[in-house]
Amino acid sequence: MHPGLKICFGILFLAGTFASAQNGIIRGHIIDRESGEGLAFALVQLNRQATTTDDEGYFIFTHLKDTLYELTVQYLGYQTHAQSIDLSAGEVWYQKIRLSSDAINLGTVEVTGSNQQIPVSSLGNYWITPDRIQQMPSLGQGDLAQFLTQLPGVITTGDQGGQLYIQGGDPHQNLLLIDGIPVVNAFHSLSAFSVVPADAIQQVTLYGSAYPANFGGRLSSVLDLRLREGASKPLEGMVGVDPLSAQVRLQGRIYARGDQQWTWLLAGREALWPYLKNQIPASYRDALDFKFRDLTMKTTWQGENGSKLSFTSLQIRDEVPLASNSSVSWQNQGYGMQFRVLPLQSDYLIGGSVGYSDYRLDFYEEGVPRSTGYKQANAQLWFANGHAENRLEYGISLNAIRSDLTFKNYRNITFNRSDNASELAVYGLYERSWQHWRIEPGLRIHYHASVSYISLEPRFLLQWKPTSQWQWTLAGGRYSQNLVTARSNQDVVHFFQAYITGPEGLLYNNTGEAVPYNVQTAWHSGTGLQWQRHGLTLKTELYFKWFDQLIEINRDKRKVADPDFVTEQGVSYGISFGAEWMYRNWNVNGHYTYAKADRTIAGDWLPAIFDRRHQFNILVRWSPSDKGWNASVRGQTGSGFPFTRTAGFYPVLNWDSGLFTNVADGDNNTGVVYETPLFQGRLPDYLRWDVQVGKRWEYAWGGELEVALSCINVFNRKNIFYFDRIHYQRVDQLPVLPLLVVQFHW
């Protein structure tokens, strides 16, 4: 092992010894009484101390004296829980606290202390629940992929899908975790649908920038998705159908005794469009031609003292026919295990995960096949001590990666790569709150073994909350990534995106000079200010990302001897202004974002293909709690993406038979001559309005029927999707599309 890593291991593991339990401990697990799922970020008060539950509903108070304590738990939409605890000297008290929903008490929880964490924080960090996902009109049943495009700093390249660009980062710079399983391309049908139905999701945390030290291996953002854990009832579920897809969720309990419980979850979805497309007008058939299927399974064991063990399986398949005898298909499978242990007579919380994913994509365009495969196995172990006022966490993670790529560039040069890579990381982070301040310094040491590079990655967060209404946040950090993508850099919509590990040999910049290390790196910084009172929230955020080294496929490679990779640089920054108003049955949320993203191409600074300068989103929802009705309106507009005009065409001759090749009768391709300088044009602006009206009926025996009528692109705006250069024609996004959604819960 590298000497530096040995030292880091010693520091991190010795650092935790200072916090061993000396006095009494009070800890618990806050769960929903009906579903058994943990309630994240619930407010827990113990006499004059206050903390919040973590993302799975756990809390802990340490170093307590033997005396009488009053414990109070508050959570929005639930009845308040209060009890007395007579703690003995050295006692470890634990209880699973079940909260009952309170449909009447929906007022905002007032936080008397200054240490309260706000789960939906600033700097592009968002805590997302299924209820929030289904509050907005969507293409079919509510979906995470479509909800994300409503958030500030999140850009999608098309309402038929495209890719997600989060605060100036490329799609392959986003870390996607599903129950700890690393998944690439976790979206169906060119990103129009996520691979997990919203009804199977427990919660999602999006870190848009400056994410903490327990995450790493990506340059831009983290999307941490947690699945449901089953149910406390023997059987419950949901079936839903719309013109695009049908889905089902089943969950239940296998065994229960006291606080011990063994539960299961099964969720699946399949596209209905292939069976219905021949019955509708051709304009819709061309806009929505896709086929997908997914299956999610999970089983969870919960012990008496709060310990937990779960197993997760994912199966995903997609196929999208394109114009001109082209098609793209991919499949993804993943398997994972997560555990959390609360040792007796200890104030430590121990957790970890093991995951494996296998992704393959095949793209066939105009007689030219391309394929890519990406396999990843990971393991993580972490230790946590203390609570929100004084908390230490440290851990270790291992990654093993296998990537394969075969394709031809526009110069008819073939790329064939098969690579293996391994990574080792240790991290530590510390949270400290006092009075009106909260700090969270952290350090991640990421060793990229395949290229023998150690990345030192400091992270920090500073929050100031002078009153219960105001909050200011400052954050930043260093990040690294050994994952490279191969795609077109001329058009914002690209159907083939390969995932490969970085090069192990010599790497050169655009001037031909060798670079000192073969890893992509970036710096993040950001600040935000938030004010909240009486249901009104005002927020402004500013972010800056400096990509000091990016590794790209050498798209101008002319001969075999030319390097396969080159390095580039990039910069992204933006500012957003947002407001949210909640009053009685109304919720209004809107924001404006100005952003800029530039990349170097052949030494020149040019706009990135996803550089959308202006974007505005608004969502209005009306939901009277006692009538069962709901209605929502969503609007989104954005400036056009950069575009490189076509200057001409040329034949790409196939010389497979050498001098004896008949170029006149051979299977040759058409090459494109691009106008220089690149990206001097702009595509038209984007504008779309969606509406939805729904009704819910509840039955005395516990069943529930929901019917919703939605209309996508209600004004039938013609928004460009991409420009087909070969056939020289514009391809538009979705026309006006009415949809009827029916869901039944029991």
Image (spheres, rainbow, N blue to C red):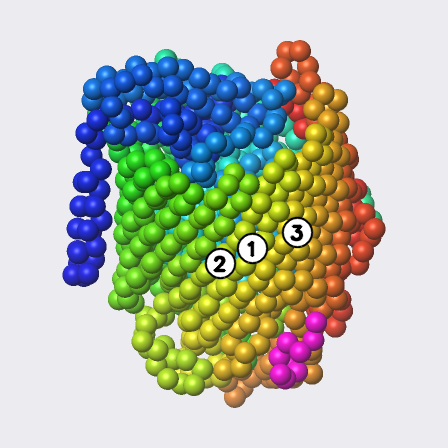
Structural distance between the alpha carbons of marks 3 and 2: 18 Å
Please name the amino acid that badge 1 sits on.
Glu
Element at label 3 = strand
Q: Are the residues flagged by discs 3 and 2 in contact, CB closer than 8 Å? A: no
Please name the amino acid that badge 2 sits on.
Gly
> Which residue has dot 3 on it?
591
- Where does the C terminus fall, quadrant-wise? top right
Q: Which mark is residue 526?
A: 2
Residue 684 visible in the displayed image: yes
> Which residue has dot 1 on it?
541
Q: Residue 478: which quarter of the image?
A: bottom left
Element at label 2 = strand
Whether residue 515 is situated above or below residue 464 in the rendered picture: below
* Highlighted range, magenta: 671-682
Which residue shows up at 49% across the image and 67% down it?
A: 486
Q: How many marks?
A: 3
Of 460 and 250, the residue lying toward us:
460
Graded by Cα atoms within 10 Å as few (under 14), some (14 to 19) or many (20 or more), the crowding at tag 2 reads many
Of 154 and 47, the residue lying toward us:
47
Comes first in the chain, label 3 or label 1: 1
